[in-house]
Amino acid sequence: MNILVINCGSSSLKYQLIDSASEKLLAKGLAERIGIEGSVLTHSAEGKEKLVRQEPMKDHSVAVKMVIEALTDKEYGVINSLSEIGAVGHRVVHGGEKFDRAVKIDDSVIADIEALSSLAPLHNPANLIGIRACAENMPGVPQVAVFDTAFHQTMPKKAYMYGLPYEYYEKYRLRRYGFHGTSHDYVSKRAAEILGKDRKDLKIIVCHLGNGASISAVDHGRCVDTSMGLTPLEGLIMGTRSGDMDPAIFSFICEKEGLTPEQMNQVLNKKSGVLGLSGGLSSDFRDLCDAADNGNELAQMTLDTYAYHVAKYIGGYAMAMQGVDVIAFTAGIGENSYGVRSRVCPYLAWLGAEVEDEKLKIRGEEMIVSKPGSRLTVMIVPTNEELMIARQTMEVLG
Ligand code: ADP
């Protein structure tokens, strides 16, 4: 069965068409600037020329129509008609405490996702727009919601409660949820497969280091802790997000700089992280690593600070699980950046990791970078959230 995987943002829609039997990627693309001037659809399929359509897309429904047209196009497409799409799998960011696994979408699920929008105001409404646009243009095709938070729902209470008045948890379900769950799930499973083992027999720490970054502790197949919190702002230092900090900083800066809470939120989400720490140099690790290699001290300090935070989380999670067998790096930085991996790995030596420096330089491939016989296995496992969404969609539909 062909599964259309959709990741819908407020003005964008990413998609992949995956054949669930062979797990082959048939086509993928991106509709950008939906509802704003300069809309464009980029579509590509293996062995075919890339299609770029610069046409107005007034809303997501038009975008979905154009995606279907591209997929069924005689020249650029990969299927003959809509009937060859068996199901749609949607990435939905926040499933709250309600969803600990993927579900088939119906009216009550839509109402639940809507109700959870207060926890993810930037994401859930956009995900719903995608769900509605697909329902409109693909009537009768089953749709499944795959939640970013679901994999983390196995965390024990001691890992997800904050040291705040308990009534906030009771009133608002204010707690740690964690994100990137589909990636943490995929990578921990794949890491075990590569090692020829069952995930249920391993203690794995997954470092998902992309623009957004999070770490999780996967103990015998179940997530027991993760670094992102109520929102994706907590945890590691990220591209432009601050990650952990003293909460008193919020009001301190508001007062000193005359910022409103909303403006301060913008600072913490868009102007902080490695971008802010490097004095505005870049949020891209390629630029930071180049600058650091050329002797830029701010860039060096930024990368050292970033790596130190990653290492501290790894240490904490090794303690939480009372041991660790595997550390897996994934996402844009985890899969590619020698500058970051070579700064994190020395911290792992006390846990028994002996790493081959040459292997740390290789980019974007599944690889065991620790030496044979190393007490701790260190690996690179490229993530594949879309494939995981397709798999879970199939599972739900049975
Ligand atoms: P997200 O999905 O969260 O937007 P990605 O997982 O795609 O992010 O990661 C994007 C980041 O990966 C870029 O900002 C860049 O810093 C980093 N990155 C990508 N390729 C490389 C590379 N070759 N070397 C170092 N960093 C890289």
Image (tube, rainbow, N blue to C red):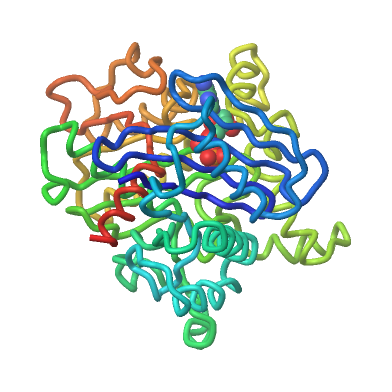
On the image, the x and y values in percent for residue 266 come to: 74, 55
Quick one: 99 or 196, which is closer to the camera?
Answer: 99
On the image, the x and y values in percent for residue 299 come to: 64, 26
On the image, the x and y values in percent for residue 344 come to: 41, 31
Rendered-image quarter of ligand 1:
top right
Q: Is residue 140 visible?
A: yes
Quick one: 387 or 293, which is closer to the camera?
Answer: 387
Q: Is residue 303 visible?
A: no
Dividing the picture into quarters, in which one does residue 78 lie? top left
Dividing the picture into quarters, in which one does residue 18 lie? top left
In the displayed structure image, the side of residue 285 where residue 178 appears, left or right: left
Where does the C terminus fall, quadrant-wise? bottom left
In the displayed structure image, the side of residue 309 where residue 288 appears, left or right: right
Point 44% across, 57% down: residue: 148
On the image, the x and y values in percent for residue 8 come to: 57, 52
Quick one: 207 or 21, which is closer to the camera?
Answer: 21
Question: In the displayed image of the protein, which residue is found farthest to the right?
Answer: 258
Point 20% across, 33% down: residue: 376
Point 29% across, 60% down: residue: 224
In the displayed structure image, the side of residue 311 where residue 192 appears, left or right: left
User: Does residue 50 sit above or below 85 in this rendering?
Assistant: above
User: Does residue 75 sit above or below 123 in this rendering?
Assistant: above
- Looking at the image, how many numbered discs can be counted on the residues? 0
